[in-house]
Image: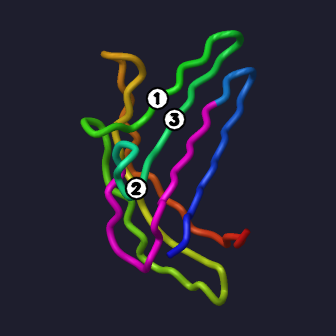
Amino acid sequence: MDTLTINAEESSEGHVTTLRLVVRALADTGAYVIGGPTAVAGGTFRDAAGYTSITFVTDSAHGGVFHIDSLDRAGQFLVGSFQFTAIAGYSTSVRVTNGRVRGHFAKH
């Protein structure tokens, strides 16, 4: 089993959002539960503008699912979708919906 890490960033006029998904035990295609530190997968979403930055993380009460629809290890290509809810502090949350990933990956 391998660990899969997906990092994405979008930047526009001083406003930056970043997304990170980690599947700790990638075995094959299928659904991977996104949750806290003991879950198979975890997610973070960071929203930064100027000097203000908020990082949202998944935990045991805030999570979702990452679906790997196609995984070609030889060609190092995958297709998947994801959705999750993450929290910053005790009350502020963000919901990431209709997330899609399609592309090549590198083994390290």
Looking at the image, which residue is at 39% across and 51% down? 98
Q: Residue furthest bottom?
A: 74
Q: CA distance from mark 3 to mark 2?
A: 13 Å
Label 1 crowding class (10 Å Cα cut-off): few <14, some 14-19, many 20+? Answer: many
Label 2: state its secondary structure: strand
Q: What mark, if any, has residue 82 been given in the picture?
A: 2
The answer to whether the residues at label 3 and label 1 have Cβ atoms under 8 Å apart is yes
The amino acid type, in three-letter code, at marker 2 is Phe
Q: Amino acid at mark 3?
A: Phe
In the rendered structure, the answer to whether residue 63 lies left or right of residue 12 reads: left
Q: Which of the image's four quarters has the C terminus?
A: bottom right
Q: Position of residue 107 (x, y in %)?
A: 70, 72
Q: Label 1 belongs to which residue?
A: 56
Q: Could you tell me what secondary structure mostly forms the magenta stretch?
A: strand
In the displayed structure, would residue 66 be above or below residue 91? below
CA distance separating discs 1 and 2: 16 Å
> Which residue does the image show at 37% across and 66% down from the upper left?
67
Q: Which residues are magenta?
A: 17-34
Q: Earlier in the sequence, mark 3 or mark 2?
A: 3
